[in-house]
Amino acid sequence: MSEFLYLERLLWFDARIRANRYPNARTLAEKFEICNRSAQSCIERFRERFNLPLEYDPLRHGYTYSDPTYQIPFIQPHQQEILALLIAGNLLSHAAGGFISRAIARFGKHLLAQTEQIGLSEKRLAEAFSGQWHGFAPAPAEVFRKTADALLKNHLLSMDYHSPQQPNEPTRRMVEPHHLQHYMGTWYLIAFCRNKKEWRKFSLARMARLKVEKTGFAPRDREEWRQQLEGGFGVIQGGELTLVRLRFAPSRAPYIREQHWHPQQSVEERPDGGLILSFPVADFREIKLEVQRYGAEVEVLEPQGLRDEIAREIRAMSKIYD
């Protein structure tokens, strides 16, 4: 279990005891949507790690403290750590149907309660920081929760999945989840698809009827799926890498110099004030859209295949506007 989830459960359990609500494994399981067995394991970990003086009251069917003066021995969090955590929640407010931001906000409140004179508040953070994406595909909170649950527990995940071209014709998939990627506001799952017998990248926005299976699996080595995550420009990976060279006009070059497109990018300055930006790609689809975004201020120098595709697109567009 991640430290974040563990501490959130610990803080909730402690608060219920102090409110004389006598929490137990059942109430902990209901609150965090886990099984009773996992909840009881959490309670035992509370006792062992923090020496919680837990005492079970058989009449109340729940736990209390044998020492009411007991305090959880928290290491006081630094202001920078709290700020970083709460900013993350603010910036991810639209991701995963708000699931992440709500979880971080709950935990952040507990952290804020542990320190005095911190000078932070939810209102102040909302006014001071924001994040915005456009054109992204949001993932429903329940889809994200089940996907993350299967991923962290190393359990198989079954789901209905549809392609953008056939939204009404989903196929049932059984996958081994290995990695969740947040790319430009959209969440993707890198998983080994047992139906196709190969690695695939699934958009959470296209998933439905998810089920975290009881069957577990042994995680595969990162080297098996690394190419799905890194290598070329953009979110579409896995293909053979090709070097792309783009020549930007002097009018656009100052903005491109400020931007990071790829870890392996290189910039060649031109005498006229323009520049040539080079980086690898595994698929032309996303880079085509990026090139079209800059219109006449960019020219594809290499590869010839991408240059030809852009030329065909320009001819097709000209017919629309002629």
Image: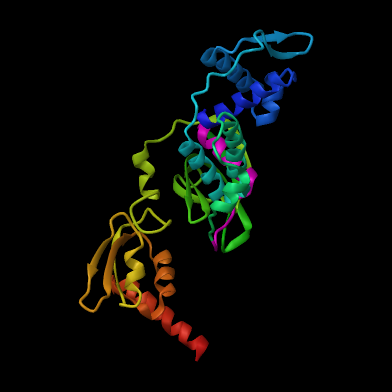
Q: Who is closer to the viewer here, 41 or 115?
A: 115
Q: How is the image coloured?
A: rainbow
**Where residue 116 appears, x then y in whole percent?**
56, 31
Asked if residue 172 lies left or right of residue 192, the reply is: right
**Where residue 33 appears, x then y in whole percent?**
66, 31
Image quadrant in which you'd find residue 247: bottom left
Asked if residue 188 lies left or right of residue 237, the reply is: right
From this view, report whether residue 68 is shown above or below residue 140: above
- Most extreme residue toward the bottom, as rendered? 322
Q: Who is closer to the viewer here, 63 or 28?
A: 63
Image quadrant in which you'd find residue 266: bottom left
- Most extreme residue toward the front, as rendered? 117
Q: Is residue 100 visible?
A: yes
Please name the predominant secondary structure of the magenta segment in the image.
helix
- Most extreme residue toward the right, as rendered? 59
From this view, report whether residue 203 is shown above or below residue 142: below
Residue at (65%, 22%) from the top-left corner?
Answer: 13
Q: Is residue 172 visible?
A: no
Q: Who is closer to the viewer here, 13 or 290?
A: 13
In the image, residue 251 lies in the stretch drawn in magenta = no
**Where residue 121 appears, x then y in whole percent?**
60, 42
From this view, report whether residue 52 is shown above or below residue 315: above
The number of callouts visible is 0
Asked if residue 319 lies left or right of residue 103, the reply is: left
Residue at (33%, 70%) from the top-left corner?
Answer: 254
**Where residue 155 appears, x then y in whole percent?**
53, 33
What's drawn in magenta, residue-wise? 134-154
Asked if residue 191 lies left or right of residue 103, the reply is: left
